[in-house]
Amino acid sequence: MAKYIQGATGEWEVVIGLEIHAQVSSEAKLFSGSSTKFGSEPNTQVSFVCSAMPGMLPVINEECIRQAVRTGLAMGCKINLRSVFDRKNYFYADLPQGYQISQFKDPIVGEGVIEVQLEDGSTKAIGVERLHLEQDAGKSLHDQHPSQTYVDLNRCGVALMEIVSMPDMRSAEEAGAYFRKIRTLVRYAGTCDGNMDQGSMRADVNVSVRRPGAELGTRSETKNVNSIRFMMQVIEFESRRQIDLLEDGGTVAQETRKFDPATGTTSSMRSKEEAHDYRYFPDPDLLPLEFTREFVDELAKGLPELPDAKKSRLVTDLGVSEYNASVLVADKENADYFEDLLGDLARKVGQNKAELATRAANWVIVDLFGALKKAGKSITESPISTQHGAELLALQVDGTISGRIAKDVFEIMLESGDNPERIVAEKGLKQMSDTGAIEAMIDEILADNQDKVEQYRGGKDKLFGFFVGQVMKKTQGKANPQVVNQLLRPKLDG
Ligand code: ADP
Ligand code: MG
């Protein structure tokens, strides 16, 4: 379903392509043994290779190659058994080599298709053009001195994967969903930590507009956008700006722009370079990269179950709803938590997983994720272990506690990290299912509230809830609600 933007002179279509830079998870840099650790003192992780001392030679870090291949496999893209490293020449103070080693004509990973899910439940296929490996540059620090700029070369030479999409996205929502999916995939594959506030993942956002069905328009490229929200703001702002410009009879300049998070706007940095401006040529210090099909197959075998496969298994084998399954698989840690908990629960209560999966998924997503979100914690920081979560649900499944009491126990678990069985025992929270005791209590309540009993019998059905409430009050919420209902109804009706 096309979502066009209404302008003063008719409808416009937005076209978006993303270049995602993802930092390879690896101890050492792409061509040197220097550490890639984040947050160290400036210029403490710089070898002679990173600082481009004359005569230094790059040596490929094989783990970075493996990571790029794993990523390509996880994205379902073609793996190129032969690729070439090229020099991309440009001058900048934080690039001591005077060129970046990148891949131009022959990248390590070729085309593929990423399927994303949209809010209305529809799916959309977005093409990937390529993934290539390249070096990161250093960082200019403008805020350390009133009149001088300092340079930190720690990032110089760190391996990046640049993942280039086809211009297939048509809205901010699609671009956000695509970025999220790529982030999910690299995190499953363990090839990039996806940590956007540390700069491990960022995107150049290419935007153009056109009349529906017309040729592609001229694009602007907004550099280094480091959050999904900002990316969506760039798209909204740029499409509006370009439409206004075109409707006023102007033309869009092919240029590089930057985003200002404070105002939510973009501004021009420079006119766009073309590939030939960089004088790309194969790096004479590096041989073409060649590997065998077996090398690739071996890496494929080492990948974990990927999110799409996991999602369909949760839906088909376990009966988890589409929505819940999407939420769970978006992060491997969330999915792992759910599956560990479900396994434990099934063992404890002796039922099969499919009978318990919906209950477990609802508890994990609504109760636990809700509480973690409130506390600003991630699943790995959860005060409730999978075993304790499973115990809490088992206590409900076997009728030891009611759903109401489970909420209280859950609150105590969040605070104390304590084991639910102990909490229930210590606080005497066991559900009362003793029919004799409950019956006696009901008789007492009915006797004390003769007027209400008359009203109920006179047709005021709603009072049933009042009597249930009285029993619950007397038992501090511990009476088994099913038993209460069963006993109360005939007594009132009788
Ligand atoms: P460059 O390095 O010059 O930016 P790339 O080929 O690496 O070129 O990346 C171009 C990016 O711009 C791709 O993601 C592509 O999908 C996108 N793109 C190309 N043409 C358009 C267009 N007319 N509108 C929007 N995006 C575009
Ligand atoms: Mg670009």
Image (cartoon, rainbow, N blue to C red):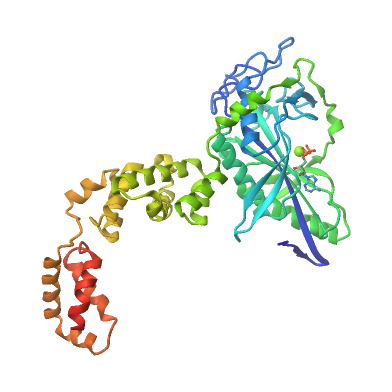
| Ligand 1 - quadrant of the structure image | top right
**Which quarter of the image is occupied by the N terminus?**
bottom right
Query: Relative to 457, is 204 above or below?
Result: above
In the image, 375 versus 257, the foreground residue is: 375
Picture quadrant of residue 160: top right
**Residue 46's x, y, as percent?**
62, 18
- Using residue 363 as the reference point, say whether residue 40 is left or right of it: right
Quadrant of the rendered structure where residue 403 is? bottom left
Query: Is residue 110 toward the left or the right of residue 412 in the image?
Result: right
Query: In the image, what residue occupies the spot 48% across and 54% down?
Result: 324
366 above or below 289? below
Is residue 264 in view from this perspective? no
Residue at 81%, 60% in the rendered image: 212
131 or 137: which is nearer to us? 131
Is residue 169 at all visible to an observer of this figure? yes
| Residue at figure coordinates x 68%, y 22% from the top left | 292
Q: How many marks?
A: 0
Residue located 23% across and 85% down the image: 456
Image x and y of residue 128, in percent: 71, 42
Residue located farthest toward the top when viewing the structure as drawn: 55
**On the image, which quarter does residue 347 sit in?**
top left
| Quadrant occupied by the C terminus | bottom left
Relative height, residue 30 to residue 189 (above, below): above
In the image, taking residue 161 as reference, residue 6 lies left or right, namely right
Residue 127 in the image: above or below residue 473: above
Q: Residue 236: image x %, image y %?
A: 70, 55
Residue 35, percent from left and from top: 57, 20
